[in-house]
Amino acid sequence: MNTFKIIHIIHSLAPGGAENLVRALAKVQRRDGNAVDVFTVGPPVDITANAYAERFREDLKLAGIGWHQLTLAKTPHAALTQLEPHLSLGPRSIVHCHIFRGLPALLTLQRSSARVVYTHHNSTYPVPPWLLYWVANRSADVFVSVCLSTDYEAKARFRGPSRMIHNGITLSSYRVHEPMRVPACPVRLVMIGSFTAQKNHLRAVEIMSILGPKYHLTIFGTGPLEQRILDAARDLGVDNIELPGVSSTLPNALARFDLMIQTSDWEGMPLSLIEGHAAGLPIVATNVGDTAAIVADSLTGYLVPRDAPAVLMAEKVRQATKEATYTALSQAARTRSLQFDIMNTAKNYANLYHHAFADAQ
């Protein structure tokens, strides 16, 4: 197969799902002989003062992947003025945008030889849906969804080809907690997610108040609502929650835990749940987005309705960590994660890139 010049556009070198997907995907694409660069378009970050971002950048550099930090302007024309000198587009160039904010800046690329791929990483929209599809129809050649709900809508509202491609991770990086043992006391729970309204960490605090001291929860992440979570824990007298920030060694860190929880109000296809299963962790989660495509209810964990009371989720956590169920859930979780290998995701995107040029002939 012919190779490509691939440019990924993401928000920042952050621990988000889209960013971690690109981190893994770009490395596979580079190993396959493609020229790959990553552009970040969020607020400028001092890499030397951010350990996670610095490790992210070094990871890209070691793989032979370029990184460019831009600050996109408010208007598409001004944004493209910033972006265009960096692109060096060739005859088989793919501009792969993973953030809506980058799409308006790509409007005029329709007149170039580049093909524009937009991947929408959530089940909700950052702007009214009509506006997102108006921009996407004028700037992108292919629309990719990571969850079924968006895929259905894209097929109805996007004029060009639309596909659904599952997220993936580098499975070999994840250490499984061995042996597959029944959790000791306290049971070590883990949650991954930025402190935003989407993740609904307040529900997690309530769950821990119900579970009591025999359970301990570590939440990896940062965000604007972090202090609100700490205040809620204090008000409920909850002292079995730890907030260590962001981990740059998460694949190894997950092996220290027994079970993962997710309390989100909405999701796309959450990469963190794939990571949890890759480490052999059963998962108790709200059934939102395409969570059910990852967590098989009663087989690799338990799903609860989005609006279910915290007491139900707490009961599912207790059930998942019982001696009679835990080992089977843990083994099935690791097995299920195998279908989300980044190699499969990369192969699907490679086929999509080739079809994008073939369809344009």
Image (cartoon, rainbow, N blue to C red):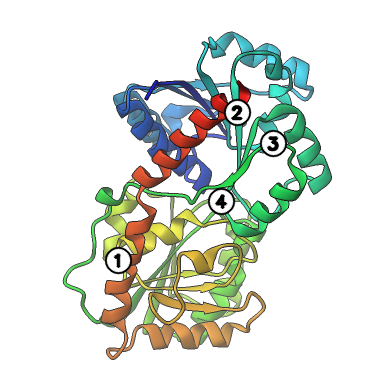
Give the mark, 3 or 2, whose residue is nearer the N terminus: 3
Q: CA distance from mark 4 to mark 1?
A: 21 Å
Instruction: Give SS at disc 1.
Output: helix
Q: CA distance from mark 2 to mark 1?
A: 37 Å
Q: Could you tell me which residue is drawn at 21 percent across and 74 percent down?
A: 180
Q: CA distance from mark 4 to mark 3?
A: 17 Å
Task: Using the image, determine if residue 174 lies above or below residue 38.
Answer: below
Camera-side mark, 3 or 2: 2
* Residue type pointed to by label 4: Val
Instruction: Give SS at disc 2.
Output: helix
Q: Looking at the picture, how far across and down is residue 277, in whole percent?
A: 36, 64
Give the mark, 4 or 3, whose residue is nearer the N terminus: 4
Q: Are marks 4 and 3 in contact (CB under 8 Å)?
A: no
Task: Using the image, determine if residue 309 lies above or below residue 114.
Answer: below
Q: Looking at the picture, how far across and down is residue 210, in whole percent?
A: 51, 86
Crowd band around label 3 with a 10 angstrom C-alpha radius: few (<14), some (14–19), many (20+)? some
Q: Could you tell me which residue is drawn at 29 percent across and 66 percent down?
A: 335
* Residue type pointed to by label 2: Asp
Residue named by callout 1:
335
Task: Using the image, determine if residue 192 lies above or below residue 206.
Answer: above
Crowd band around label 4 with a 10 angstrom C-alpha radius: few (<14), some (14–19), many (20+)? many
The answer to which quarter of the image holds residue 143 is: top right
Q: Which mark is residue 68?
A: none
Camera-side mark, 2 or 1: 2
Give the mark, 4 or 1, whose residue is nearer the N terminus: 4
Task: Using the image, determine if residue 264 lies above or below residue 49.
Answer: below
Give the mark, 3 or 1, whose residue is nearer the N terminus: 3
| Residue 40 visible (yes or no) | no
Give the mark, 2 or 1, whose residue is nearer the N terminus: 1
Residue named by callout 3:
160
